[in-house]
Amino acid sequence: MAKIYIIDVTNRDGVQTSRICLSKLEKTMINIYLDQLGVFQSEFGFPFTKHEINYLNANLALAKKGGIKKMRLSGWLRAVPQDVNAAFDNCPRLQHVNLSISTSDIMIKHKFQGKYGRADILKNVKRAVKAAKTRGAKSIGVNAEDASRSNMDYLVKFARTAHEAGADRIRYCDTLGKDSPFSIYDRVSQIAQAVPIAIEIHCHNDLGMAVGSSVAGAKAAVDNGRDAYINTCINGIGERAGNADLVSVILAIRYGAGLNAGTLDKRIKLRTAYRLCKYASYALGIPIPINQPGLGANAFAHESGIHADGALKNRKNYELYDFHDLGRGEPEVVETGRRITVGEYSGIKGFRNVYERMAIKFDNDAQAAKILELVRYANIHNQKPLVQEELRFIAEHPDIAKQIFSMEP
Ligand SMILES: [Zn+2]
């Protein structure tokens, strides 16, 4: 049976969004959380962008030493051979890439302005896939930007070209969020029937349909025997009105009428969702909306008489799923008395106090001093108080942390 996997694009599409920013340490923490959630692949950044390179190489090293266990890390590139070669020069351990190019006549005409026609785009795809294969890519996705506004016959031809060149997946991008669940089901079905290739579904939320269109597109692929890979962002962030929300997509496949929970990648463990989404909210500086599916403050709240009474009698009266399944329900301890924190101007005594409270011990003073220095840099790097998971990460992976903080324009 064909399956649905999750490729999260928070660390690429999410952070390229206007007024949204994550530090390289925060992006790293998000990769670790996504791995714990069982996400198949994190599109972790741009391997041709200079300020990303140390972070990307550090995360590839982290994966090699087991700090990221199963999740693939993939780079986003333009589908041109020079970008592919630059990416593999910059990140020699890179194994997974997505190569992107526009396929709609609107973008071909108004973005490329005569530089490329439809045929040139197919030629570029062939050359870029070949270059990635030559450089040792283990998996390649080819992105059809603006697929939802592309000519259907041309889109099929594009998918066939990518497949014949050796790509593993094609990414159907609803770049402007124009698709509805009905249109995307129809269009993805046509691709799936014509070309034997796995299909990524990448939807934006401009009409509020990103999650609906994502699961409908994935269902179309699966119904036609192709694996589907839904692109998501944590807390639904992303360009303009956002991308498809990670947790909502998982909940929709598990509990949505007409969808099959058995098609979802078995590795998904939603129990870490609450921690992940709370961390992302803190890192991004963007609160989780009160009504966000599964994670909002009101997602399991009941007040009106009939609802409260019904939920108390049996939660199934008014709740579709259990809050425990999302990792909610644990009490949270908030310190209201004296508090020692650690940051950019900390000394060794306060530092040791903070780490002792987390039950982390150091072999000797030199090691403690080394971690303290990294913690100072981490605070400068993040420009906000460090959380326990970050402090723990720095103590466990000091050399990787140092590489992440290193940046030279
Ligand atoms: Zn996008």
Image (cartoon, grey):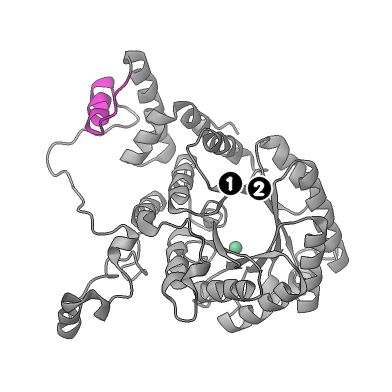
The residue sitting at 77% across, 74% down in the picture is 194
User: Which quadrant of the frame does ligand 1 lie within?
Assistant: bottom right
The residue sitting at 48% across, 28% down in the picture is 402
- Quadrant where the C terminus sits is top right
- The three-letter code of the residue at mark 2 reads His
Helix, strand or loop at disc 2? strand
Q: Name the foreground residue: 243 vs 314.
A: 314
Residue 349 is covered by the magenta coloring: yes
Q: Name the foreground residue: 226 vs 338.
A: 226
Helix, strand or loop at disc 1? strand
Q: Say left or right for 336 vs 374.
A: left
Q: CA distance from mark 1 to mark 2?
A: 7 Å
- Looking at the rendering, the stretch of residues picked out in magenta corresponds to 346-362
Cβ of mark 1 under 8 A from ligand 1: no
Residue contact at pointers 1 and 2, CB within 8 angstroms: yes
Where residue 37 appears, as percent x and y from the top left, is 43, 53
- Which residue is disc 1 drawn over? 73
- The three-letter code of the residue at mark 1 reads Leu
Residue 385, can we see it? no
Q: Name the foreground residue: 256 vs 306.
A: 256
Residue 260 is covered by the magenta coloring: no
Residue 164, can we see it? yes
User: Toward which corner of the image does residue 60 lie, by quadrant?
Assistant: top right
N-terminal-most mark, 1 or 2:
1
Q: Is residue 99 above or below residue 313?
A: above
- Which residue is disc 2 drawn over? 96
Where residue 30 appears, as percent x and y from the top left, is 45, 48
Q: Say left or right for 97 vs 132.
A: left
Where residue 397 appears, as percent x and y from the top left, is 44, 30
